[in-house]
Amino acid sequence: MHDILPEDQKYFRKIVEVAEGILHFYGFGKIDIPVLEQTELFSKGTGLSTDIVQKQMYNLKTKGDDLLTLRPEFTPGIVRAYVEHGMVSLPQPIKLYAVGPVFRYETPQAGRFREFNQLDIEIIGEKSPVKDAQLIQIFYNILKELKIKNLMVEVNSIGDSQCRSYYKKLLMSYLRSREHSVCGDCRRRMKENSLRFLDCKEEKCQPIKAQAPQIIDHLCEECHSHFKEVLEFLDEIEVPYRLNPYLVRGLDYYTKTVFEIFKEPESKGETAPIALAGGGRYDGLVKLLGGKDAPACGGAAGIERIVYLMKTEEEKKQKEVSLQGSQVFLAQLGDLAKRRSLKLLEEFRKARIDVAESFGRDSLRAQLGKANNMKTLYTLILGQREALEGTVIIKDMVSGRQETVKMEKAVEQIKKKLKK
């Protein structure tokens, strides 16, 4: 679990402000639900076979023997509120959103927290595929408004209970002969819910998953038609997407459309996509939790991950601004040269010429490499010999030409060159 320090508060506020602006336009109302709920709500709603219920929930027992759980997600709690408060009698659909902390006993790793914040969006009481597409569009627009680049939506359909039942048997038949080649978790999943196998991220299971039958090839006519319309709507609103036939999401209540939104790598330094938001349709959950049968869809975005990307982008911009601000770089080699450099740097400050330097680095090659990365126009090179002779080398970083001038003439020479 982590602290949100003062310097990070502005990012959290910005995300909520942008999200609320978009959600209010689409007619969503805010709901706050308890952090603690009855454990049964999640074991029943989220699903007994899910990793969340089996491994990640924080459970406690009260003095009155009530079993309670720190909410690991918002959807079951919001559906409970929809049922308890008789929202079914209001004009449908009911559009709700929530923001706040959720709790999961995650394995500690970079970017994973056991208490983290989510933006959750739910549309209850509407079965049209246009709502699936609109939900995806809303998450996509929020992320775009926050200046997150290279977004891609992955989408799939996992059918309804009817066609999924047939597919699960088909998948089980495929997995049975490969049982000893999958991870221990997947062997357990095979006994409880074979569909969970497709959600596995273990490396040894990936080749087996890649050859597994695809649920999209075994949808009933209604589910196929629903999914086709969702894709047509996404085409119409020009949201970039790709089909992922093995996307199932890790929750038992999903039906038909499921989706995830990723930030794709922009450079070789970024090795993997970052999942930012995900969700889908859950047409049976309201009835399962004691309400009248009501179709619904929803999803959630991880706020900490968005904050991480916003901070990274801001740092990148600040670096670019600082790099562009210095057209001159001062490289030095040796103790005497370093002392002379301090005086020379002061002369440039008085002349109001920005000069970048890297006094902490002794390698001339490393300093020249930095000057090159900064796209500096000129590099001043001051070595032991130059320090003794009172000279400095001016290197043109574009042409590669260099000249030696007296140290007291260096500022004047650079001024002339920058005016050209």
Image: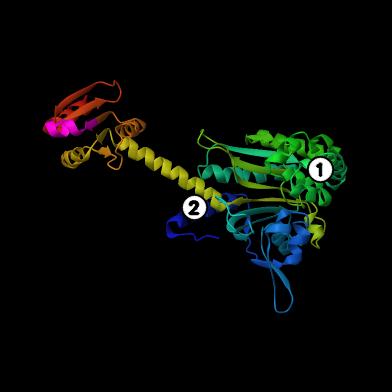
Q: Which x, y percent locates residue 319?
A: 38, 40
At horizontal 72% and vertical 49% (from top left) the residue drawn is: 250
The residue at 28%/21% (across/down) is 400
Q: Residue at x 81, y 37 (%)?
A: 224
Report how many numbered discs are placed on residues in the image: 2
Image position of 64 with respect to 365: above or below: below
Give SS at disc 2. Answer: helix
- CA gap, disc 2 and disc 1: 48 Å
Of the numbered discs 2 and 1, the one sitting upstream in the chain is: 2
Q: Is residue 403 left or right of residue 105?
A: left
- 96 or 349, which lies in front? 349
Query: Which element type, helix, strand or loop, lies under badge 1?
Result: helix
Q: Dividing the picture into quarters, in which one does residue 199 lie?
A: top right
The amino acid marked with disc number 1 is Glu
Please tell me whether residue 385 belongs to the stretch shown in magenta.
Answer: yes
66 relative position to 336: left or right: right
Task: Name the quadrant of the N terminus.
Answer: bottom right
Q: Nearer the viewer, mark 2 or mark 1?
A: 1
Q: Is residue 40 visible?
A: yes
> Of 158 and 338, which appears nearest the observer?
338
Q: Determine if the magenta segment contains residue 410.
A: no
Res 14 label: 2
In the image, what residue type sits under mark 2?
Lys
Q: Which mark is residue 179?
A: 1
Q: Which residues are magenta?
A: 380-391
Q: Is residue 44 above or below residue 234?
A: below
Residue found 48% across the figure and 46% down from its top: 310
- Camera-side residue of 194 and 202: 202
